[in-house]
Image: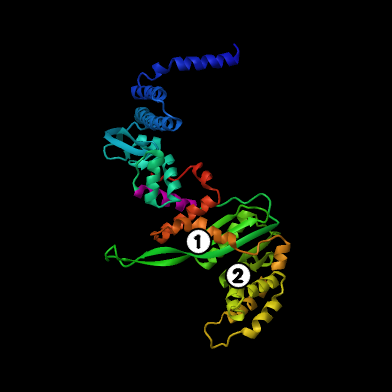
Amino acid sequence: MNPELLLKSSRFKTRRGLEERLAHRPELLARLHHIVDTLEESISDGCDAHAAEERVIEQLRQLGQEVLGQWAQEANTHTQAQVRTQHPEAIQHGKKSLKWQSSFGWITVAEAQWRLGRRGKLLRPFCARAGVAPRGSSRRLQRVLVDFGAEESFARATQRVREHYGVEVAEGRVRRHTLEHGAQMSALVVPPPKDSAATLVTQMDGSLIPIVVPLAEGLDRRKGKQAHWREVRLCLAREKESATACYGATLGSVGLAGELWRQTARAAGLGRRTRVHGVGDGAEWITTQFQEQFGAQGHYLADFWHVSEYLGAAATVIQPGKPEHWRRRQQGRLLENNLGGVLRSLAPHVEPEEQQEAPVRAAQRYLNGRREHLDYAGARAAGLPIGSGEVESGHRHVIQQRLKLAGAWWKEPNAQAMLGLRVARANHLWDSYWNHPLPSFN
């Protein structure tokens, strides 16, 4: 017989047997009738496409919940029938209502419980088979909650879940799953490319986030805490011609930030022969870590716009009538690597040591202390950036967009978990995380 005709015949038989197959599933059969009724009513009522879509979505949500409920009942029956075969000594120990929340709503099943002997281990075979826990969350719902919780406040995330999925979830459930999965994502590593990069661009910078530290136990919980600002160190690295960077972030020490910086560079393609172009402000901890991590492979450039701030402050003293004109002239000299010309312009106006407000002296010292980090002409000739706008932008979209929401204060472990989550998303590891077996966070 022609294989195509055989396939069509098989499909026809399956469709003919649908009413029969659903005979012992009356809830599902009724729901399918409701879906057809919705179609016909939407046509007869003259609904536009938007109203028809809303009606259909509601029916599909209810269908999803009923299909999952029916699956749970039948899978539970099948699982219970196998208990005595797998555990001959098992004794039934009553039944208990098992509920878990899915992206379609709550699913409930009456689960039989067993004991291995009269005082042995308690078995909940359907929980083990289904991979759920009492009053837990399905993996799909967890992904939804973490997705919204990663971008919005936990309270706002519950509103978005209700709006887009029609499911009511507690704010605490969103918080718990977001932080649990964020902590797991903190351990994710970006796999390095097969071939090492010829040139890497890399940057490091720090920004502050609000942290709450609990005080001594026994105090009023509303008052027994102290708020302060903590520095997050963010680094990034990318191949010279790439627009996609790898990120790393930590609340840890300067040394830990340096190690993370090198790991991030490896993920972006750092090899033994890779030339590393670093750019950022002239903070000593950053330049020191750059030298320790990249050594002779690297060359660090002071952020041109940060240097320009010093020149701008000095310009108001040196040429108060036209400070912009003087600043632009010095910027042009720096772009040509004419540091001597800039220092000569500063020298006659340097304030005395006893003067506290001394922008000219500050500019002179800043430039003198970073002579080896001012090769703007070389960077431009090589097509390399002279500003650290990438990492500053990274602070906004990777860290601050979520961790500095109005009114948000974090315990340090929770902040680190959220950083791990935000960095994993920025590094495009979201899908790979959810597509692999996950820890049980029901």
Which residue bears the numbered disc 2? 287
Q: Amino acid at mark 2?
A: Thr
Q: In terms of depth relative to the viewer, which is nearer, 340 or 176?
A: 340
In the rendered image, which quarter is residue 94 located in?
A: top left
Q: Amino acid at mark 1?
A: Thr
Does the rendering let one see residue 293? Answer: no
Q: Main secondary structure of the magenta part?
A: helix
In the rendered image, which quarter is residue 238 located in?
A: bottom right
Quadrant of image for the N terminus: top right
- Work out which residue is located at the far front of the displayed protein and give it: 321
Mark 1 surroundings within 10 Å by alpha-carbon count, few (fewer than 14), some (14 through 19), many (20 or more): many
Read off the magenta span: 171-185
Confirm whether the magenta stretch covers residue 431: no
Asked if 16 appears above or below 381 in the picture, the reply is above
**Label 2 SS:** helix
Give whichever of discs 1 and 2 has the lower sequence position.
1
